Image (tube, rainbow, N blue to C red):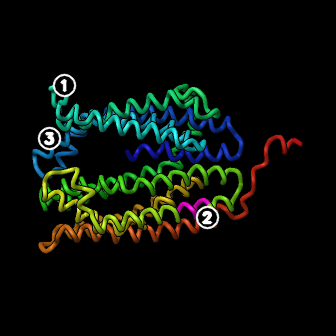
Amino acid sequence: MALGPMVGVGALSLIARAIGARRPEEADGVYRQTLLLSLALSMIVLAGGYLLAGPAMAALAADDATHQQATLYLYGFIPALALMFPTGAMAAALRAAGVVRQPMFVQTAAVLINIILAPVLIAGWGTGVPLGVFGAGLASSLAGLAGLIAFALMFDRVQTLIRQPFRLDRLDLGLSRRIIGIGLPSAGEFALMFLTGLVVYGVIARFGPDAQAGYGVGSRVMQAIFLPAMAIAFAVAPVAGQNFGAGQAARVRETVTKAALFSSILMLSLLAFCQISPHALVAPFSNDPAVIDVAAHFLRIISLNFLPSALIFTASGTFQALGDTRPALIGSASRLITFAGPAIWLSGQPWARLDHVWMLSAASVVLHAAIVLWLLRGQLRKKLSGLAAPVSVASASA
């Protein structure tokens, strides 16, 4: 999943700025290169995923049963990861063009398809052939395929700048390097999130499979809670990017300020709910009291970083709009120092409890937010100073 932003973020940034500068041919060219890169990554993920799923889960799981079940799940889920790349290329182009509502409907429909298929494939409802956790992964893959088809069918209908979503051009190494150059730090950011997750699973393995299962439930619920703030952050990149391409510095600043305000208000309200009744959020996803307690306790502590996380999301969208995602990578890398190292040390202490891991994680996110906001201030000052509207070809010739 870390590879997705490597092309998606670069494409969104370049396409949005090309649209703002009224250069549709450039926007189309960026999209075609993004599609080529996405299809290549799909093949890599399919091959690498099936080769490495088993060994990777063996290194992480707390026991053999968890290893076997996790591997089966990935065998069903890997096609969904491969489908993510061409779908992400189309989604990036649509977001850059300001088309958000229709992709959201498609993605919501894909989630609903996943929800409907999951019990059918997991428990064999109506088929009499239960597939267990493999069915859970397969449900996601089939839903991803439905989403890709829907994106392809609607692509030409919701915008007019880029036509024929699957038409390929020849490889342009220079343009591909530009796309990857902007997106690579975002890929690194996701990779660091992956490494941080590995550290968490490794550290809490000593507390048993209930702790790992509880963290799995709690982290998924947390991701769902983050969706409103992430939705606002997703809007920052195309809106600020188009205004940046059009030379409208004041509008870029206004976009960032309002997005930070709206997402902060949302996350503060969700923080209050997690403090009052975290069990209500996690109870539907497990019938094991021990797992539910771990997940609820995780949410109560980790919700303290909801507000910093909202600001991090907003800053990340702004960095994408400005075409320099390195500051976001620097912020994420700080967690290797403030969380990963101390957590590994903490795991070797006989007095350590799960609460200590969650509190350490929350504190590291606060520091992450402080670093990112400081870097954002510098980027806005540097990129927007003297920004002017681009001169069109017609104006120049006149």
At which x and y percent is residue 308?
42, 67
Query: The C terminus is located in which quarter?
Result: top right
Name which of mark 1 and mark 3 comes first in the sequence: 3
What is the span of residues highlighted in magenta in the rendered image?
A: 255-260
Residue depicted at x 52% and y 26%: 166
At which x and y percent is residue 344?
23, 65
Q: CA distance from mark 1 to mark 3?
A: 24 Å
Residue 327 appears anywhere in the view: no
Residue to which mark 1 is pinned: 127
Residue depicted at x 57% and y 48%: 13
Q: Nearer the viewer, residue 255 or 45?
A: 255
Residue depicted at x 21% and y 55%: 283
Q: Which is in the foreground here, disc 1 or disc 3? A: 1
Residue to which mark 3 is pinned: 68
In this rendering, the answer to whether 160 lies above or below 179 is: above
Name which of mark 1 and mark 2 comes first in the sequence: 1
SS at mark 2? helix
Q: CA distance from mark 1 to mark 2?
A: 57 Å
In this rendering, the answer to whether 223 lies above or below 339 is: above
Q: Residue type at mark 2?
A: Leu
At which x and y percent is residue 72?
19, 37
